[in-house]
Image (tube, grey):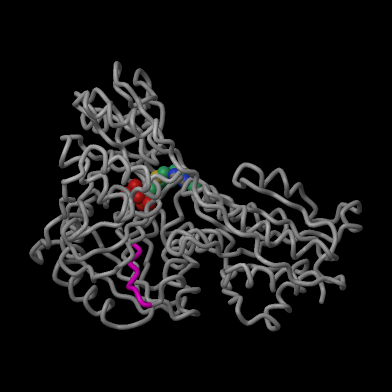
Amino acid sequence: MNGAQALIGTLAGSGVDVCFSNPGTSEMHFVASLDTVPQLRGVLCLFEGVATGAADGYGRMTGRPAATLLHLGPGLANGLANLHNARRAGTPLVNVVGEHATYHKRFDAPLESDIDSLARPVSHWIRRTARAADAAADAAEAVAAALGPPGGVATLVLPADVSWSGDAEPAPPVPPRGPSLVPDAVIGEAASALRGGASVILLGGAALRRPGLEAASRIAAATGARLLGETFPARLERGAGLPGLERLAYLAEFAQAQLAGTRQLILAGARAPVSFFAYPGLPSSLVPAGVQVHTLARPGEDVCGALAALAERVAPQARPRPQPEQRPALPGGGLTAETVAAVIGALLPEGAIVSDEANTSGLSLPAATAGAPPHDWLTLTGGAIGQGLPVATGAAVACPDRSVLALDSDGSAMYTIQALWTQAREGLDVTTVIFSNRRYAILDLELQRVGAVAGGDAARSLLDLSRPDLDFAALARGMGVPAARAASAGEFADALRRALAEPGPHLIEALLSQAG
Ligand SMILES: Cc1ncc(C[n+]2csc(CCOP(=O)(O)OP(=O)(O)O)c2C)c(N)n1
């Protein structure tokens, strides 16, 4: 067996069953080996940012890493923004980067670059495989490193001659570690903090799945503590029958209002809240002065176990408070961000997975969908736009029996629009809704918030997506995805119903009649 065959066999044996790929010459032996290991499905992505974002979506939904296959430093660089989002999400991901043959590097051929320096900021584990005989063991370790906990991006740099040299064999999986248990004393401290009153429990990471939410809801019911979710969760389970959860607002002023009056802030899998950006004269930390911060569980610790133990201590009799089933009525009239949200709330299928990159057009979505049947909500964890369509693609590969909705604003969608082609090629059940406001609307707002001088024409033109107007329906059709345009709430509801009823990918361009 050559190194590539041993590596792929090991990945498959360690539970990696998909590789989102954009290969080049140095990866040809990896590509050839896919035919000898059918358990590893190669999925072609036409831009590396699609591959890395899809691997992120896959990992968020399965808890297992997908692999990527990227072409040397430039291929990796194209995929970095979504690796950054994956890192912030704590997603397990095995990032395979092809490299020149070991003896070829010193010739400084055109694609020669410093792969390790590009990979380091997004990777919590990096290895450069030196010999074919090491390829399998390195792959097994990469999977274990990706799984953590906490999960993260494990980058394996694979020289071409390591791939093509012989004398290798697959390695057994490295057993995964469980999360570290939270000591009893820490749970005791949180229990005392709750007795101090005016408490907020800020939930993040694994606490946003049903067991964590239900334990937290019991604690809230018994102690009067308020629950908040982190602003940009990797994966939030929500909908009717689950405890409802308000998320901390993106805008610092709103987040400050949500936290006003708090005396005890208990972090359960979430980081202490900070402002997304610095603004002249405003604080970076969103923890109000005088608030005591207690860490119940850090990322990588067993936050659900800690919340369950805390609930047993302070709320032994309490029951979780489920969100009642309640959908908005189908609206009529014009198409605005609000009417789109109401239609989505009215029609969201049970078990849907929503990849939310709607930005300013998404403000009404949480309320409109709160009482819809249970579903998962995936958000822009690292603030690097261009994540929504790739994450939806990976989620659909991970969960072929569930409907996936990508709710994307027009500016963000254009970064990685090629994801549509992969959805068509793989027959993925993804409905993409484009909120077409033809602006970088949030930057209009930020222009004022940072105190920049009110924009003139030159400034405005950098935030304006018209001239020419994008035609997303035509772009989608050009990549094999059936598409419709909707200009009224009724047209949008009809198009969404049809898209959800038919298998395979669809795109609906929502032509918003007013910005925002
Ligand atoms: C990778 C990356 N590049 C640039 C930005 C800066 N940025 C933040 S929001 C935004 C525009 C968003 O426009 P759109 O997706 O249409 O949403 P809208 O603001 O109109 O709701 C840009 C360019 C970013 N966050 N990430």
Say which of 459 and 32 sits in front: 32
Residue 176 makes an appearance in the image = yes
User: Which image quadrant: the N terminus?
Assistant: bottom right
The percent coordinates of residue 243 (x first, y second) are 20, 52
Residue at 29%, 54% in the rendered image: 437
The percent coordinates of residue 508 (x first, y second) are 30, 70
Seen in the picture, residue 490 relative to 194 is either above or below; the reply is below
Quadrant hosting residue 13: bottom right
Q: Which residues are magenta?
A: 401-406
Left or right: 349 as drawn, with respect to 13: left
- Does the magenta-highlighted stretch encompass residue 403? yes
The percent coordinates of residue 275 (x first, y second) are 37, 30
Quadrant hosting residue 132: bottom right
Seen in the picture, residue 468 relative to 481 is either above or below; the reply is above
Seen in the picture, residue 297 relative to 5 is either above or below; the reply is above
Left or right: 29 as drawn, with respect to 416: right
- Does the magenta-highlighted stretch encompass residue 173? no
